Amino acid sequence: MQLALLLVCTLVLATMLAYVAHDAARSHRATAERALHDYAAVAAWEFVAGVGDEIRAGAGPALAPIRARAISPYELLPAPTAIIGGAAGALRCPAGAGDTARSYFRFDFRDRSFTAIGSPLSPTMRDWLTDTIAAHGSGIYQPDWTHAVVVGAPRGERPTAIVYAVKYAEHRAPIAAYGFTTCPAALGAPLYRAVLDRRTLLPTALASGVPNDSLVVVAVIGDSGRVVFESQHAALSPYFAAAPLEQPGTLTARATIRPRAVELLALGAIPQSRVPLLAGLLALMAAMVGVAVLQLRREHELSRLRADFISSVSHELRTPLSQILLFAETLNLGRVRSEGERGAAAEVIVQEGRRLMHLVENILHFSRTERRMTRLGVEPVELAPAVQATVEDWIPLAGAADVRITTHLDHGVIAVADRSALRQMLLNLLDNAVKYGSPSRDVSVGVESVKGRARIWVEDRGDGIPPRERERVWESFYRLDRHANSAVAGSGIGLYVVRELARLHAGDAWIEDARGGAEAERRGIRVVIELPIAERAEGFTEEHAAVETAR
């Protein structure tokens, strides 16, 4: 009955998922089309910005000498020769463009006088330059501009591009304009091609290493609709956007995503056939039936593991409780013969109390993790003192087991961690090292910084863990066969708690071979806890740390 109910639920879920998948596919297409239009807009504005940068790179330094603010509106003005040094090589006409002659001029707004040197100007051209600069410089030019470009021509004259900057006095009063003339071709195809070759028009994450011509077609269009420049002739897609060129402002840049770029950007690959979806749903139904069977087996296995866990925990708790009760009764009945024996009995009670507290804390951490209620209060913690304090607390218990603990602590390593959780992780590793370490009873504890991450490691020289089982030991309730059938007490949750707490810190934990010593002596394991270093964890806040476990 339960299995039939599960299959009906599976069929209902498959039907719902089919509808959701169809709706998602339609939404995906609409989102992809919007994204492609947005990418085209980004490309257009990037092209416009690149053209502006190219013009500024040529005109800005050339006109820089005269942009300093005048002290007085009546200041004497330098001759146009002041800009020849920087402007002589700026925005030159390309070879074969026709007229390469250039004039350098100064226009005085105060008395409308016009001075020019270089290539001779016809009276008509002088009048047109005077009127154009007077109107544009006083009516359109802004004080925070570095330059302006105007393209035009008087009747009967060849088209000319004017590149100029305005010199201001106090209170933003324009007193003069300095500039030079060049051919419009200097602002045309060669400049646009240079922008396409040098500037990435789409986000680097999408267009890294891919030429602009493989992704977009860029065209520059005049106000009459005439195409002034086009990067290439190719089949166009319906995804395009336009942006006005700032200088000269009568042109518009249009960027169009190429059809094959749609596939390259992986934004339009939406499957048309529903067969894959239906086949996937059928596979999902079969998988859910299999999951149901596996879930039943898992529940049975979990029941057995929990029974084993209760038995193991009871055994572990009974040992320290027996010791505490024994020595407490000894003290209560006054059976000690000296103060030394009294102190030794009290020390045993304290040690076993600490062991009992550690076991209880471990169980509480495991319970919170299983119920997804573990919360951390992280802060920058210097690891060396924290680890040293925990080791010193553990030394009496280690000494009772005839274990020697050595430390190798790099000072100055500061991690983002919860102090209580950090102590619990280290105590679990020390407990395992003492239980399963080598007969030599040597355990090493270290702190180091590796590749921008903080690491705490505990190493012993025992029999080690086979590589094929080094991941399984992190599972709850799992114990190696040789330990499960031995007299060594263990609940199988210690390493599980360590890894879960480490991952809640945005870190991890793993097992590797022990290091150091001669080749023949390299036995045992090293258990490593990796945590984020404080200086690299600005985004790791308490809001991120105070989360539920996600198993």
Image (cartoon, grey):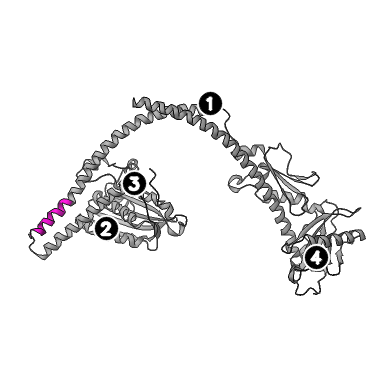
Badge 2 vs badge 3, beta-carbon distance below 8 Å: no
* Amino acid at dot 2: Ile
- In the rendered structure, which disc, 4 or 1, sits on the residue that comes first in sequence? 4
Q: CA distance from mark 2 to mark 3?
A: 30 Å
Residue depicted at x 88% and y 53%: 158
Q: CA distance from mark 2 to mark 4?
A: 81 Å
- In which quadrant is the C terminus drawn? top left
* Amino acid at dot 1: Val
Badge 2 vs badge 1, beta-carbon distance below 8 Å: no
Residue 364 vertical position relative to residue 394 in the rendered view, above or below: above
Instruction: Name the residue that disc number 2 marks.
Output: 405
Residue 258 vertical position relative to residue 455 in the rendered view, above or below: above
Label 2 sits on a secondary structure element that is strand
Read off the magenta span. Answer: 321-333
Instruction: Name the residue that disc number 4 marks.
Output: 178
Corner quadrant of residue 218: top right
Q: CA distance from mark 4 to mark 3?
A: 74 Å
* Amino acid at dot 3: Thr
Q: CA distance from mark 4 to mark 1?
A: 70 Å
Compared across the picture, whether 422 is left or right of 64 comes to left
Front tag of 2 and 3: 3
Residue 312: x and y in percent read 22, 43
Compared across the picture, whether 440 is left or right of 182 comes to left
Badge 3 vs badge 1, beta-carbon distance below 8 Å: no
The numbered disc on residue 275 is: 1
Residue 427: x and y in percent read 29, 54
